[in-house]
Amino acid sequence: MLPARALTREEAGLDVLRLREHWLQHGFGHWAVEERESGRFIGRAGIKRHPDWELDSENTEVGWLLDRAVWGQGLATEAALAAIRVCREELRRPEVISIAHPGNAASRRVMQKAGLALAGARRWEARGLDVVWYSLRF
């Protein structure tokens, strides 16, 4: 989960390195999301594992981070559905989760539209955050 503010150049560079390492370690991760017409980079979405998620260190989380300019166009839901399909069909995972800040109503709606159901709310101790998580079992 990223901060609610824009990342600095250094933070963005570290984030890219972490995403690359995740791909190398797990064979899956986040994909670049581009605007179809222009090819402009508008965010990322995909699958991520959080070893510090205390409930299940083997979790598979679907997530997205998109430019505010494209919010409300259904792109997050489309990306979530694509990630869920990969988890089910290619990775053969028994469950996917998605994690958000409790007040992030837009992400919670995306989770519901993608077929995930509220699984709980808790303090993510390793990150010092209060979160909600949604789940879909196959």
Image (tube, rainbow, N blue to C red):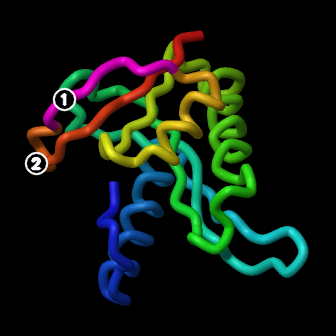
Asked whether 75 or 18 is in front, the reply is: 75
Residue 121 is inside the magenta segment? yes
Task: Please state if 28 lies on the left or on the right of 72 as rendered.
Answer: left
**Is residue 63 shown left or right of residue 42?**
left
Q: In the picture, which quadrant includes the C terminus?
A: top right
The magenta stretch spans which residues? 117-123
Q: Secondary structure at mark 1?
A: strand
Residue matched to label 2: 128
Query: Counting residues from the N terminus, which is met first, the one under dot 1 or under dot 2?
Result: 1
Q: Residue flagged by tag 1: what amino acid is it?
A: Arg
Please tell me whether mark 2 sits on a helix, a strand or a loop.
loop
Q: Which residue is mark 1?
A: 122
Residue in view at x 9 percent, y 39 percent? 125
Relative image position of residue 36 (x, y in whole percent): 86, 68
Viewer-nearest residue: 4 or 62: 4
Left or right: residue 108 versus residue 102 is: right
Question: Magenta: predominant secondary structure element?
Answer: strand
Inter-mark Cα distance, 1 to 2: 10 Å
Amino acid marked by disc 2: Gly
Where residue 88 appears, as percent x and y from the top left, is: 65, 21
Q: Is residue 69 above or below residue 19?
A: below
